[in-house]
Image (cartoon, helix red, strand yellow):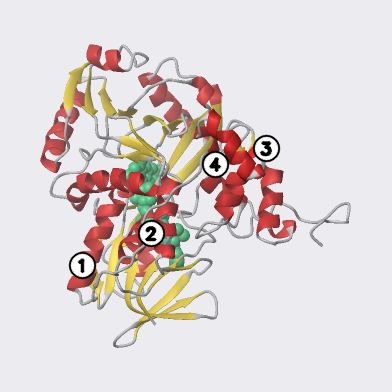
Amino acid sequence: MYDVAIIGAGVVGRALAYTLSSFELSVALIEKENEVAMGASRANTAIIHAGFDPTPESMMGQLSVEGMRRCYQLCEELDVEHRKTGSLVVAFEESQKSVLEILYRQGVENGCQGLELIDGQETRRREPKLSEGIQAALWAPEAGVINPWEFTLAMAEVAVRNGVVFMPDREVTGLAWQGDHYQVTFSLPEVVQARFVVNAAGVNSDLIHQMVATSAFEIVPTRGEYYLLDRTVGPLVHSVIFYSPTTQGKGVTISPTIHDNFIIGPNSEIIEDRSDTGVTRTGMDHIGEMAIQMLPSLDLRANIRNYAGVRANSRRGDFYIRMSAEHFLDLAAIKSPGLTCAPSIARLAADLLEEAGLPMRKKSLWKGGRRVIRFKEIPEEERQAFIKDNPLYGRVICRCETITEGEIVAAMKREIPPVSIDGVKRRAGTGMGRCQGGFCGPRVLEILARESNRHPLTVEEDGMGSFILTAETKGGCAHD
Ligand SMILES: Cc1cc2nc3c(=O)[nH]c(=O)nc-3n(C[C@H](O)[C@H](O)[C@H](O)COP(=O)(O)OP(=O)(O)OC[C@H]3O[C@@H](n4cnc5c(N)ncnc54)[C@H](O)[C@@H]3O)c2cc1C
């Protein structure tokens, strides 16, 4: 019997698990995939939004600025890669200029600081490669970029260190209220009991809601596709550049990543299949066109990967956060800026759970904080000492990103070890560069199998069933 079962290990479920881990509570975090951050939390634009987009009366408006500030604070406390870059929303015509004015007023009301409306000339002074056609822009100095996987993982690691039980590979198929607790059932023959249940199931949050309450909202899965450009193309821009938003969303963005690559996208397309993260020629063409309008010198041939994420949009146009049934809390329809708002959503969720009767007593001992060794960032003079201490730091596995075997092995020893090649990528950064794992993939597979004492045939690329090797061809496998 757990005090709280959280369904969904995306950034929202993880932020809540992190928050609850500082109280005397038993918490289970249930996830259908084999890893954390397998939904929208891994495939997004990775922007810490300043908070001018949502209207002040919306829940998103009320949670944005608090979320943004807490994001930066958590990134410092948990050693998560991030950078405050500022953002520009650019306008090419009069109608778009009036949108900027609306955003400015909303931002001021939401509590954003340092917002400025600037003309085209000033915009190009700050970002010289932007188009001559831009007439005005809204500057928001508090926006930034983040490593969204690391953010989710970092909160997860601290939560697990402080007693939260992570239960991957369990798809919730049923919830039954038993008078004083819920019985949570899965696709596996197994049951979890919990006094409170929190629905943080992202794009499936309406389906989980309907297991205990009448339908109150419907998720309209909306796909956003992207180009990822190699860093050799840059520097293109220093800040995040948004095309003036439309009713469809925030508009196409050109953004530096924390690893100095560039993300171009997303578009916005309603789809039937909630799990469809494929990219399309039409989507790519649309994104390319909009981006080139903002940045005429953009060379899309520097593309090293395309990907897509699915937004948990609802027709209500806002987050759906409330106690919807006895001891059942919805953290549902968490669309953009849900990554930025995750910490403030978690704070609100903890308040709502307490109001609903969950006893919240602070733990006397809580182990916070987190540090990661990023070998390439260590000053040259200190590297030798590191290698002397642990020769694995002297073996570079990923040549594009200069990631050493020492970093991979360290990732394997953390609170939630990776179970797949992409899991190593998300923790250590292997395969993030130009060759996208073409060279280091087989070596990562070997290390993963060796360190987790598994047969190489059982190692997956990413989600469940994505095996890489199908059979031995020459016999004599060292792991037999
Ligand atoms: C294209 C795109 C761009 C975005 N850009 C930004 C941005 O730049 N900045 C920003 O702040 N926000 C952005 N967002 C929004 C942000 O990514 C999301 O709001 C946030 O990641 C949502 O987190 P979540 O935990 O609610 O959902 P998810 O990350 O989707 O997590 C939900 C989890 O629930 C699990 N699950 C689902 N069903 C079940 C079940 N039955 N049983 C068990 N587990 C289940 C899923 O596997 C998943 O891991 C963007 C979103 C998209 C899609």
Mark 4 to mark 3 CA distance (whole Å): 14 Å
Mark 1 to mark 2 CA distance (whole Å): 17 Å
Badge 1 marks a residue whose secondary structure is helix
Badge 2 marks a residue whose secondary structure is helix
Q: Is residue 22 left or right of residue 310?
A: left
Mark 2 to mark 3 CA distance (whole Å): 31 Å
**Residue 352: mark:** 1
In the depicted structure, whether residue 259 falls above or below residue 181:
above
In the depicted structure, whether residue 432 falls above or below residue 317:
above
Mark 3 to mark 1 CA distance (whole Å): 47 Å
> Who is closer to the viewer here, 477 or 138?
477
What amino acid is labelled 2 in the image? Arg
* Mark sitting earlier along the chain (4/2): 2
Dot 4 surroundings within 10 Å: few (below 14), some, or many (20 or more)?
many
What amino acid is labelled 1 in the image? Leu
Please report contact status of discs 3 and 1: CB closer than 8 Å, yes or no: no
What amino acid is labelled 4 in the image? Gly
**Residue 14: mark:** 2
Please report contact status of discs 1 and 2: CB closer than 8 Å, yes or no: no
Mark 4 to mark 2 CA distance (whole Å): 21 Å
What amino acid is labelled 3 in the image? Gly
Mark 1 to mark 4 CA distance (whole Å): 37 Å
Query: Which of the image's four quarters has the N terminus?
Result: bottom left
* Mark sitting earlier along the chain (4/3): 4
Dot 1 surroundings within 10 Å: few (below 14), some, or many (20 or more)?
some
Residue marked by disc 3? 438
* Mark sitting earlier along the chain (1/4): 1
Residue 466 appears in the figure: yes
